[in-house]
Amino acid sequence: MTKFFKIAVRNVLRNKRRSIITGIAIGFGMLIMIFALSHAEGQHKAMIGAVVKNGIGHIQIHKKGYVSALDQYKDTLELAFDPSKIEGITAEEDHIKLITTRVNFIGLASNGYETAPVIGTGVEPDKEFQISSNISIIKGRKLSKKDDGGVIINKKVANALNLEVGDLITILVQTVDGGLNGSDLIVVGIFDLTSQFIRTPNLYMNLKSAQSLVYLEGKVSETIIVVDDYNNAELISQSLNSKLKNAEFEVHTWKYLGRNLLDIAAKMKMGMRVWTSLIMIVACIGILNTMIMAVFERIREIGVLMTMGARRSEIIRLFLIEAVVLGGIGSVIGSSLGILLVTILGHTGLPPMFEFLPSGELTYPVLKVSDTLISILVAIIISAISGIYPAVMASRLKPIESLRTT
């Protein structure tokens, strides 16, 4: 094998110009592959951050059936629960940075003349806006825990009802017992969303005010948990599920709650793999061309090898090794340049590709060793496949006729 490898390397270097051009094509394909996969991985990581920043958090706890009812746009007020029932259990878990609660409701907002539908939520402001960091105040200020009679509203609601900071807004809702209740509140802020991909509330008020409005004193719709590292969310969720298995609760992580966005990320990365593989296939056509040219240039040499006892299988092996060497050299050079490019962009960042990622924020390519190794392996395999036809063609040459070739 060593003998064939030395011969293969010598043959690759024999026609340097053609080998360099072919190597550049393979290297460029490899560079694109490394960059594309790293960029897709960076987008995936940014999407995970977007899931959390859109108010989902890392873990959510609800009464059983809440998420299903929400997906079906059913009333969820009757699925509220007393958060004190799980406070002791959540306090036992490590790696938890923040725990907060909400009351979610739907209703109508009015300025006295016109109405508009609203999705409202009662929150603990000092904690909520650490999670819902996609909220950008454009007028007024953020809600504070002192604002018992205040709200912040989305700019679309403000425009629909012609409301400004300091104006009175009337909220009408259906209560948990099926009745109606209303409240007059002061607009303390108007916000816009830097990103949105889920049903985000367009009205925020204090938790106690919301509880009083919908007659849910002491109860909440959900508990949201933020952990120190999103990779710990699954383990904590499993632990909470085991502790709450006999209770009427369900625990979901960001992976489930943000599954639609994460599915997009997974499909995007798969598409990148297919696209970059096609680029490599096109690049390896250069190997096919180079190896076919090598066969025609070395017909007499192949004939000499056969007359000296070289078997057809050894001729095939020689040309396959040449193809792999050519592909391997191009892959190593291309991957090195790709790693350098990704390292630089990993510090400078790139604009996000999707509107539901926070505007103004950059995404940073993430280089995975596994992606790099798989890319090099794919390139070498494609290179070997590209060399099969020329290798077989060379092995089928007849020694006598080959020796007559000048």
Image: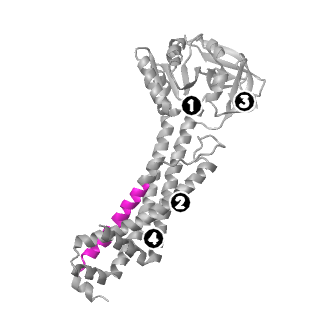
Q: CA distance from mark 2 to mark 1?
A: 42 Å
The residue that label 3 is drawn on is 190
Which colour assignment does the render follow?
A: one colour
Instruction: For mark 2, give the secondary structure.
Output: helix
Amino acid beneath label 3: Ile
In terms of secondary structure, where does tag 4 sit? helix
Q: Alpha carbon of mark 3 to alpha carbon of mark 1: how far?
A: 18 Å
Return the x and y of residue 105 as percentages of the image width and height: 58, 20
**Label of residue 110 in the image:** none
Identify which residue, 241 or 236, lies in the foreground: 236
Residue wearing tag 4 = 22
In the depicted view, which residue is nearer to us: 383 or 218? 383
Is 339 displayed left or right of 348 in the figure? left
Label 2 to label 3: alpha-carbon separation: 47 Å
For disc 4, the neighbor class at 10 Å (few under 14, some 14 to 19, many from 20) is many
Tell me where residue 66 appears, x and y as whole percent: 48, 21
User: Which residue does the numbered mark 1 point to in the structure image?
Assistant: 199
- Magenta-tinted stretch: 375-398
Q: Which circle marks residue 337 in the picture?
A: 2
Q: Earlier in the sequence, mark 3 or mark 4?
A: 4
Determine whether the residue tagged by mark 3 lies in a helix, strand or loop.
strand
Main SS type for the magenta part? helix
Rendered residue at 53%/50% (across/down): 39
Question: In this image, 161 relative to 297: left or right?
Answer: right
Instruction: Tell me the amino acid under the disc marked 4.
Output: Thr
State whether residue 124 is above or below residue 55: above
How packed is label 1: few (under 14 Cα within 10 Å), some, or many (20 or more)?
few
